[in-house]
Amino acid sequence: MILEALFIVALALVAYPYLVYPLLLYALTRNRDGPAPPPPAVELPPVTVITSVYNEAAVIVDKVKNLLCLKYPTDRVRIVIASDGSQDDTVPLARNASQGHAHVEIIDFETRRGKASVLHDLVTRAQTDIVALSDANTFFEPEALERLTRWFSDPEVGCVCGHMELIPAVEGSRNESMYWTLETRLKQWENRVGAVLGANGGIYAFRRDAYEPIAENTITDDFVLPMLIRKRGYRIVYDSTAVATEETAPTISHEFKRRTRIGAGNLQALSWTRDLLRPSAGWTAFTYWSHKVARWVAPILLVSAFLIALTQMDAPFYRGVAIVGMVLLAVALTGWLLERAGRRVPQGLAAPYAFVALNLALVAGAVQFIRGKQYARWSRTPRGTESAGP
């Protein structure tokens, strides 16, 4: 009887963040309007756009060109691209691409310290009240920066998250796009109740006075930085018209490495932002528990339910659940073997493979964090048809 109860509770808690919460949030917010942007300012506010890079020679020229095409007065924007100890041609390529543009600065930090340290250095030395952050492989639409900065005429707004459109790089990467579609919907609905969680790392901006210095070992800076701003009482706003694009990882194996890092960052972020889980945080507490924490514990609950089913194989229902679990694992293993062999994973296998792999990545990341094996320095995730190497 106890095992049956535990089994039901485990499956219910797994279903909650992926099925129940989205439906519940939609029902609660469908008759609500999101915050309206302030009236256009007479003059656009000065802003510093910062991109921290590491070994991004493959995309850095396109990134510089993209930032130079922003529809923003050059006397109101400063573009800073900082290399965190790159060992390829990132720096000379960036300098060559930015020649003749006085509002662009290329900084070469020879010692690799990690993204959080670089961002902290650049944010604290910024001379503007507003700072925008981006990634090397993220490309802004021309009006994106203007649409981010317009919100800061409202003194209650501390951070603005833009909208990221993921471009499937190759067959099999559609699953990340499907996942991102759900994430985008949730962000839209959470925005309606003033409870946006974190930001899209490739496109967001914040008020420098609201910035809370982040630790040099911060793993998920695009979650921690906005949430610390929220903790100080400022609002986080999501603007779906401030658009940027980014290619997905070419394979689920490549995405696994990034998700493992995120898994480690989840526990770290939770320890720094746990005050926002208290009922006094209102809607933010509700969305934080439902959208984030419930997902973070889902892999453990899934394993628990599977193990319970294995111990109750005499009962037809549990035997069926155990068989489904074993088939799912077999499909995931097949997908992994196909990728290891350099072959494309059929679309019918890719979705279950992605589900298993990315949940395992969260567990692997949590284990790394507990063991102290996860570091703030990152290795870039290959995009498009790039190879990650061994």
Image (cartoon, rainbow, N blue to C red):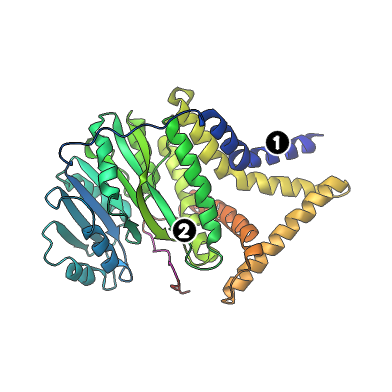
Q: Residue at image x 36%, y 43%?
A: 161
Q: Amino acid at mark 1?
A: Val
**Residue situated in front as seen by the camera: 144 or 161:** 144
The magenta span reads: 378-384
Q: Residue at image x 30%, y 33%?
A: 157
Q: Amino acid at mark 2?
A: Arg
Q: CA distance from mark 1 to mark 2?
A: 30 Å
> Relative to 55, is 305 above or below?
above
Task: Give the structural element (helix, strand or loop) at label 2.
Answer: helix
**Residue situated in front as seen by the camera: 16 or 267:** 16
Q: Percent position (x, y) of residue 185? A: 50, 42
Q: Is residue 383 magenta?
A: yes
Residue 270: assigned label: none
Q: Is residue 51 magenta?
A: no
The residue identified by callout 2 is: 258
Q: Residues within 10 Å of mark 2 (few under 14, many from 20)?
A: many
**Residue situated in front as seen by the camera: 114 or 68:** 68
Q: Main secondary structure of the magenta part?
A: loop
Q: Is residue 79 visible?
A: yes
Q: Residue at image x 46%, y 74%?
A: 389
Residue 9: assigned label: 1
Q: Residue at image x 20%, y 48%?
A: 48
Q: Residues within 10 Å of mark 1 (few under 14, many from 20)?
A: some
Residue occupying the far top of the picture: 280
> Relative to 176, is 183 above or below?
above
Q: Percent position (x, y) of residue 368? A: 50, 54
Q: Is residue 211 visible?
A: no
Upstream in the sequence, badge 1 or badge 2? 1
Task: Give the structural element (helix, strand or loop) at label 1.
Answer: helix
